[in-house]
Image (cartoon, grey):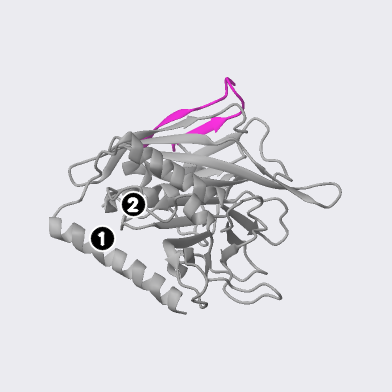
Amino acid sequence: MTWYRNLKLHLLLSGVLLFFSSASSGATELPVALSPEEVECDRQQLEHLALRMVVSEVEPGAEALNPSLFLWRQASGGASYSGLAVTDSVREDSLGKIRDERQLSIEMVFGEKGDLLDPRRPLLPHVTIARRSQDSNLVVATSEPWMTITMEVAALVEDPYVPKIPLAVNSLKTNSGRRQPLSAADALGRGLLADGLTRPCHAKLTAFDERIFRILSRTLRLTRWFTLLGAGPNDPTAWNIVLFRGGDPHLYRGTILGYQRVRNDDGTTTFNRLELTALEFEIHWDAEGRLTDGEIRLFPQPHTGRLSIFLLPPMLPGRDQQREGTFAGKPYLRFDYTDAPSNILTAPVNWGDLLANSSWNQ
């Protein structure tokens, strides 16, 4: 499995380069300003990637679930990306609010020309996807929620749940009937070149930027709960959230891409996309690079759909639970419908408080 060894070598070298670049400078390499063109290129690349991907969740005894998939570009250079899938985790039970989740971490590496066994065939763009087992909850299908991340590599993306050229990884630890663990996959496809995924937009992202992306992926949570109509028992909505830099070094941005796979009365299914919704994070830090305060902002569109957004402290997924006491006073946004008096579209963020019990702000 040469491609898998190459991927592991790429990830190892990326980590080594990031470590030595930080160590050689003797100080934290803080973010730098980006041009409007660089920001727009990042946004388009990540949104194109997100439109090719879906996350699905299976939980014993549950019906419709609402998982999320976070995506961002790595700071190590090249066309490499990270992702974190999260189960449907924030809801309400008889004791009040609860957060209880599982996570599946992935890495993706793209290239412009992939080798084929047949030397007579043309070289095509390629992608390799692999799960990071040490950062993931690997589970047995019969006992815990588990997730599958699927990607369409074909030029035309119709329904990523049933791709023509599929890539998939899941969080299964062992075989369960016909279900098998999927730890890595690779594929070739012209669509990757058309979407511009094989070349990075610039080389200005820093290890500090990537740290912010990882913190956001582990603190930002979306749900239909706590909105005007609440969560529907048969609501199949899932979300992809792409994270990228803004032009100002203190500005980080996101796009929420919601989608649904709906089962029709005749037994067929229909894949629907919701309107894209923008997020902004203004983040400040001290001279040592420790995050201090900031603000989160939501920019809903007319057809965004109801949505609640929380920023919550990082947790050990699969073991810890967070209850009402953790939610109290934490940043919270809410969108019910356009101009609704109940909408909350901005909130202050105390990053020192949010990350107080983690090692990510030392």
Tell me where residue 113 sits by quadrant. bottom left
Q: Is residue 322 visible?
A: no
Name the residue beneath numbered marker 2: 210
* Picture residue at 63% right of the left edge, 74% below the top: 180
Q: Which mark is residue 18?
A: 1
Residue at left offset 35%, top offset 67% = 11
**Residue 203 showing in the rendered view:** yes
- Per the image, is 339 magenta? yes
Q: Which mark is residue 338?
A: none
**Residue 347, image x, y percentages:** 43, 30
Write down the region rendered in magenta: 329-350
Residue 68 magenta? no
Please tell me which residue lies in front, 288 or 166: 166
Residue at screen point 58% across, 69% down: 139
Question: What is the three-letter code of the residue carrying label 2?
Answer: Glu
Residue visible at 58% across and 54% down in the picture: 155
Q: Furthest-front residue in view?
A: 120
* Above or below, 42 relative to 3: above
Pinpoint residue 315: horizontal percent, then vertical percent: 44, 55
Query: Residue 183: percent from the left, percent from the top?
Result: 53, 71
